[in-house]
Image (cartoon, helix red, strand yellow):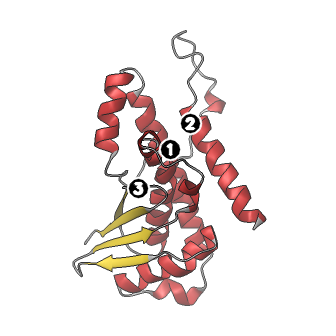
C-alpha cells in the first residue's frame, strides 16, 4: 500500500514540475547544461485522443505555452517508456516468450497492471487486427481528480506516463506499438494499443 501511495505522489510531482511555469522563460537566460536531462529519448508513444482539442485550447489560451506542454508530455512519455522497459526486463523469463499479441496484452492487463497499480485492468477488447482497447474504470492516477469538465481537460498529462509505460513494456516483449489514451468521464480511461506490423 505504501508503494502505491509513494508512486502516486512521485507521479503527481513529476507532472507538477513539468507543468510549472519557467520563471526565467522571458529573461533569455540559458539553463545550466547539467540541469537538462540528456538521457531521455524522444517519445515513441502517441498521446491521448483529446490532445488535439486540448492543444487547440492551449494555443488559444496560452499561445507561448503550447510547445512547452507538448515537450512536457513527451518527457513524461519518455520516462514511462524507460520505466516500462525496465519492468519488462525484470519479468520472469517465461513471460518474455509471448508469440501472440493477445497473450502479451493479457499479461499487461493482469500482471503489469497489478504490479503498478495493485489492481487488474477492468477490460480488454480487440478487433483481432492489431488494435486493442484496455479499459480501467477507476484509474488510480485519476481517482483523486474532481469530476468536472475542467478536470477532464487536465487528464492527458496524467496519462502520458502510463502510455509510455505500456509502450515500453510491449517493446521489451518484442512488440512495437502506438499507445493513445482517452477519458470520457473521470476516473475511467481507455488505452488504445495499436501493434505495428513490421
Above or below for 177 versus 93: above
Q: Position of residue 182 (x, y in %)?
A: 36, 56
Q: Is residue 181 above or below residue 176?
A: above
Q: Is residue 40 left or right of residue 70?
A: right
Q: For marks 2 and 3, give the CA distance.
A: 24 Å
In the rendered image, residue 89, in percent from the top left (x then y), is placed at: 58, 73
Q: Which mark is residue 62?
A: none
Asked if the residue at tag 2 contacts the one at tag 1, i.e. Cβ–Cβ closer than 8 Å, the answer is: yes
| Residue 37 visible in image | no
Which residue occupies 54% across, 65% down? Answer: 84
Distance, label 1 to label 2, CA atoms, is: 8 Å
Pair 1/2: label in front: 2
Which residue is label 1 attached to?
A: 75
The residue lying toward the viewer, choosing from 185 and 53, is 185
Q: Residues within 10 Å of mark 3 (few under 14, many from 20)?
A: few
Q: Quadrant of the N terminus?
A: bottom right
Marks 3 and 1 sit apart, C-alpha to C-alpha, by 25 Å
Q: What residue is disc 2 on? A: 18
Circle 1 packing at 10 Å, graded few (<14), some (14-19), many (20+), is: many
Tell me the SS state at disc 1: helix
Q: Quadrant of the C terminus?
A: bottom left
First along the sequence among labels 2 and 3: 2
Left or right of residue 24, residue 68 in this image: left
- Under circle 2, the secondary element is helix
Query: Which of labels 2 and 3 is toward the front?
Result: 3
Q: Residue at x 36, y 84 (%)?
A: 102
The residue to which callout 3 is attached is 185
> Residue at left 46%, top 55%?
186
Residue 192 position in % (x across, y down): 34, 65
Identity of the residue furthest to the bottom in this view: 94
Res. 135 visible in picture:
yes
- Residue occupying the far right of the picture: 2
Amino acid at each position: 500500500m505504501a508503494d502505491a501511495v509513494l508512486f502516486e505522489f512521485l507521479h503527481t510531482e513529476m507532472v507538477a514540475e513539468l507543468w510549472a511555469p519557467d520563471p526565467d522563460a522571458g529573461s533569455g537566460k540559458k539553463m545550466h547544461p547539467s540541469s537538462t536531462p540528456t538521457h531521455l529519448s524522444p517519445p515513441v508513444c502517441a498521446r491521448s485522443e483529446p490532445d488535439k482539442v486540448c492543444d487547440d485550447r492551449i494555443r488559444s489560451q496560452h499561445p507561448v505555452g503550447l510547445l512547452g506542454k507538448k515537450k512536457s508530455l513527451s518527457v513524461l512519455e519518455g520516462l514511462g517508456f524507460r520505466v516500462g522497459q525496465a519492468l519488462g526486463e525484470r519479468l520472469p523469463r517465461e513471460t518474455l516468450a509471448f508469440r501472440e499479441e493477445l497473450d502479451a496484452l493479457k499479461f499487461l492487463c493482469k500482471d503489469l497492471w497489478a504490479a503498478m497499480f495493485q489492481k487488474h485492468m477492468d477490460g480488454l477488447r480487440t478487433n483481432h487486427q492489431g488494435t486493442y482497447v484496455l479499459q480501467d474504470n477507476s484509474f488510480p492516477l485519476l481517482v483523486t481528480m474532481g469530476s468536472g469538465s475542467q478536470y477532464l481537460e487536465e487528464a492527458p498529462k496524467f496519462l502520458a506516463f502510463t502510455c509510455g509505460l505500456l509502450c515500453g513494456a510491449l517493446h521489451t516483449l518484442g512488440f512495437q506499438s502506438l499507445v493513445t489514451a482517452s477519458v470520457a468521464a473521470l476516473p475511467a480511461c481507455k488505452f488504445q494499443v495499436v501493434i505495428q506490423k513490421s
